[in-house]
Image: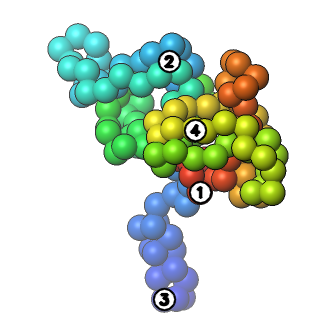
């Protein structure tokens, strides 16, 4: 019985295995220092398709963290559940297929955000509005999934 109680306590203290993620669905959204527009300050502005990790909720606001570690509050109408990633390295190869054997489609830069179209193992297909900005990237070069 003591072992069961110990395991249960450890699981409670460990927290969730996977954080809830949301994605910005408007052209630009503001992260604020308080869960309100009135009396709050903007701590960051984030572009469309930016993934955000949900840390807390209050009324219609979500406290979120971006890939840089910036924490702020965002109104829940500015985000959705569609998966997205942000590139975390300075210059990366985005390929025409899921693997290093495929040719490079374009170079992705740190901070660029993309909606996720598909996943295959450790590879993620990302897509922009322009076809030449679509391709496959190693999940290890991104944040948001």
User: Marks 3 and 4, Cα distance to the nearest angstrom?
Assistant: 52 Å
Can residue 57 be seen in this snapshot?
A: no
126 or 34, nearer to the observer: 126
Work out which residue is located at the far bottom of the displayed protein and give it.
2
44 or 82, nearer to the observer: 44
Q: Does 13 appear above or below 84?
A: below
- Quadrant location of residue 36? top left
Which residue, given by chain and number where applicable, does mark 1 sit on? 140
Q: Position of residue 128 (x, y in %)?
A: 67, 24
For mark 1, does the 10 Å Cα neighbourhood hold few (<14), some (14 to 19), or many (20 or more) residues?
A: few
Q: Is residue 67 left or right of residue 22?
A: left
Q: Secondary structure at mark 2?
A: helix
**Viewer-nearest of discs 4 and 1:** 4
For mark 2, does the 10 Å Cα neighbourhood hold few (<14), some (14 to 19), or many (20 or more) residues?
A: some
User: Marks 4 and 1, Cα distance to the nearest angstrom?
Assistant: 14 Å
Q: Secondary structure at mark 3?
A: helix
Which disc number belongs to residue 108?
4
Q: How is the protein colored in the picture?
A: rainbow
Work out which residue is located at the far top of the displayed protein and give it.
38
Q: Secondary structure at mark 4?
A: strand
Q: Secondary structure at mark 1?
A: helix
User: Marks 2 and 3, Cα distance to the nearest angstrom?
Assistant: 46 Å
Which residue, given by chain and number where applicable, does mark 2 sit on? 78
N-terminal label among 2 and 4: 2
Can residue 145 be seen in this snapshot?
A: yes
Residue at 73 percent across and 37 percent down: it is 105
Which residue, given by chain and number where applicable, does mark 3 sit on? 2
Q: Position of residue 39 (x, y in %)?
A: 18, 14
- Quadrant location of residue 115? top right
Instruction: Please state, as top left, top right, bottom left or bottom right, where the N terminus lies in the image.
Output: bottom right
């Amino acid at each position: 019985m003591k072992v069961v109680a110990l395991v249960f306590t450890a699981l409670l203290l460990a927290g969730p295995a996977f954080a809830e993620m949301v994605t910005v669905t408007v052209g630009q959204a503001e992260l604020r220092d308080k869960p309100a527009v009135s009396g709050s300050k903007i701590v960051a502005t984030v572009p469309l398709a930016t993934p955000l990790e949900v840390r807390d909720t209050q009324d219609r606001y979500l406290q979120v963290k971006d890939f840089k570690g910036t924490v702020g509050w965002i109104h829940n109408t500015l985000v959705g559940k569609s998966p997205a990633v942000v590139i975390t390295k300075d210059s990366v190869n985005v390929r025409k297929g899921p693997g290093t054997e495929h040719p490079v489609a374009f170079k992705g830069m740190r901070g660029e955000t993309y909606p996720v179209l598909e996943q295959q193992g450790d590879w993620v297909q990302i897509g922009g509005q322009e076809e030449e900005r679509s391709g496959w990237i190693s999940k290890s070069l991104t944040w948001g999934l």
